[in-house]
Amino acid sequence: MIPENHPRYQSLMLRNKMAEGVMQGIVHPTGLIAHGRGEAFDYLLGERTQSFADDAARAAAAYLKIAKKPVISVNGNVAVLVADEIVKLAEETGMKIEVNLFHRTEERVEKIISILEKHGGRDILGMEGDAKIPGLAHNRAICSHEGIYAGDVILVPLEDGDRCEALKRMGKKVLTIDLNPMSRTARNANVTVVDNVIRAIPNIREHYGDVKKPEEIIAKWNNRKHLQMAMDFICERLRTYYR
Ligand code: ATP
Ligand code: MG
């Protein structure tokens, strides 16, 4: 039991959830390492949604507004951390939910689908695996024809850089949530929300409700500049931390 007044209560609770996720076969063991890398960056970012992340969440919402076939790709980490918020975002935006795993097994896909269903998710894709993302080897290429394959705007939180690139080559608009502003995923996406998924998903939903002129927001969006702002923020924080 972690006492609620522990200064790192929330972070420790999330670690527990991730560890349970591994024991239940929902999270792949390497998912814990990805989570740890995320935690390190979250620490540097002050564990809050900074203004550049809020702007990116608005830009992501703008892309979802103009999308004809938006899809969110869900893996084990994301399901354990924010299944409820994913279902809400999908309901509000009309986005399809697809379970798509880097280390794909049908058993894990099934387990993640059932978590999302427990939170009210419907018609969740992922089991059929009836299409392939071109240019990727093995199981990592498998996706749903009706979902990621046919989608035009794909929200891929915590995606592998290689797959992000492959989706871009297919002509899709890729939105990602990644705490590491230097990752290949962060650099390749059309919009990178440098924030924790637990904050970013509900924030994108809030912006979706408010966005008025999505085309204008998209036209003005410069993801590289935005990633540099995230890096500048970290640098400034390090430079002045003990002053
Ligand atoms: P690549 O250059 O291939 O994109 P990467 O640094 O993104 O490499 P991955 O194996 O894709 O490495 O790791 C997952 C990424 O997800 C990490 O960059 C990590 O910062 C990020 N991450 C982990 N947990 C979270 C979280 N809760 N919210 C947002 N991002 C997270
Ligand atoms: Mg990545």
Image: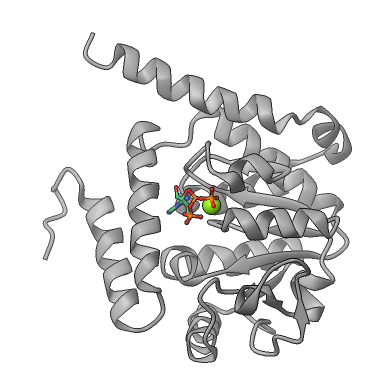
Question: On the image, which quarter does residue 184 sit in?
Answer: top right
Q: Nearer the viewer, residue 59 or 145?
A: 145
Image position of 148 (left or right of 106): right
Q: Quadrant of the N terminus?
A: bottom left
**Could you say where residue 206 lies in the image, as x and y percent from the top left?**
63, 47
Residue occupying the point 53% across, 70% down: 75
Q: Nearer the viewer, residue 208 or 79?
A: 79
The figure's colour scheme reads: one colour
Q: Position of residue 130 (x, y in %)?
A: 76, 87
Which quarter of the rendered picture does the C terminus lie within?
top left
Residue depicted at x 49% and y 65% = 78
Height in image: 38 above or below 29? above
In the rendered view, does 42 fall on the left or right side of 179?
left
Q: Quadrant of residue 151?
A: bottom right
Q: How many marks?
A: 0
Q: Residue 54 at what x, y percent from top left?
A: 58, 35
Residue depicted at 33% across the width and 84% down the height: 24
Task: Point out residue 176 in the picture as x, y percentages from the top left corner.
Answer: 62, 50
Q: In the visual, does 129 lie left or right of 101?
A: right
Q: In the image as oriented, which residue stretches furthest toward the top?
A: 243
Residue 52's place in the image compared with 143, above or below, is above
At x 81%, y 27%, the residue is 220
Q: Please tell me whether residue 177 is drawn above or below residue 160 in the rendered image.
A: above
